[in-house]
Amino acid sequence: MTPVFYLSDGYLANGAEPWRLPDIDKLPPIEIKFADDPQNFLPYARDEETLSRPYALPGTPGLEHRIGGIEKQHLTGNVNYDPENHHFMVLLRQAKVDRAAQDIPDVEVFGEPSGKVLVLGWGSTYGSITSAVEKLQREGKSVSSAHLRHLNPFPKNLGDVLRSFERVIIPEMNLGQLATMIRAKYLVDAVPFSKVKGRPFQIREIVRKVEEYL
């Protein structure tokens, strides 16, 4: 019951490495349990763990309810213009998104779990970041990396990972959107390293940037 944006185009357009295509038949199924009890159906009731609403197939007799952008009343789903209800529903929807972090794997650190520099990335920067960090680690430098696969919400252990390093550097193929989010949410003085040239990061570019802070 939550829209998901799957950002795959950037990986393909700005990456420079082989890609392993998954076997679609081996992917785990996504099971949906549809509501089927008209007598006890409340379209805006919430699951206690996930805060998701019941899923009713449109047109199911007895399960008809309003949908759309106008604010609804908690539980009943009736159109509601009360300011207090609107405030409550906005907080409830945000809490539902936040709780999705329960199903997101912890972010993993490549290298030591703490040290001088963490290179944090997302998307197509993975190959360049990993190769640069491998080179620096072979030279005995205190450098690790982490790569995000989930951006909203972030993995629940991300704050602890960031605070385990003296400096966080974020190479991005944009003007620093992730760096802005990291600085705002975790109050970490992350260093943005932006490149918007339509070409992937070169390994030596990231190596030089990290060496500035070692």
Image (tube, rainbow, N blue to C red):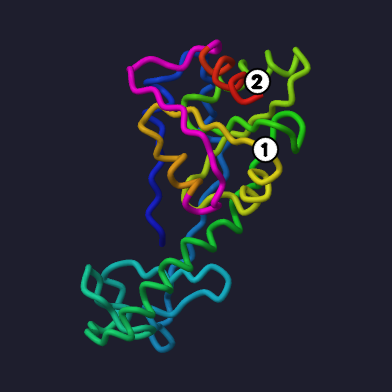
Q: In x, y percent, where is residue 33?
A: 48, 65
Quarter residue 78 falls in: bottom left
Q: In x, y percent, where is residue 59?
A: 26, 71
Between 194 and 92, the residue placed more toward the observer is 194
Q: Is residue 46 left or right of residue 67?
A: right
The 10 Å Cα crowd at callout 1, few under 14, some 14 to 19, many 20 or more, is some
| Magenta residues, start to end | 184-204
Nearest-to-viewer mark from 2 and 1: 1
Residue 196 colored magenta? yes
Between disc 2 and disc 1, whose residue precedes? 2
Which residue is disc 2 drawn over? Answer: 133
Which residue corresponds to the image point at 43% horizontal and 81% vertical from the top-left? 37
Kind of residue at badge 2:
Val
Please determine whether, in this image, residue 126 is positioned above or below residue 154.
above
Numbered badge on residue 166: 1
Kind of residue at badge 1:
Glu
Q: Is residue 111 left or right of residue 10?
A: right
Between 213 and 143, the residue placed more toward the observer is 213
Please determine whether, in this image, residue 29 is positioned above or below residue 68.
above
Q: Name the quarter where the C terminus is drawn.
A: top right
Q: Name the quarter where the N terminus is drawn.
A: bottom left
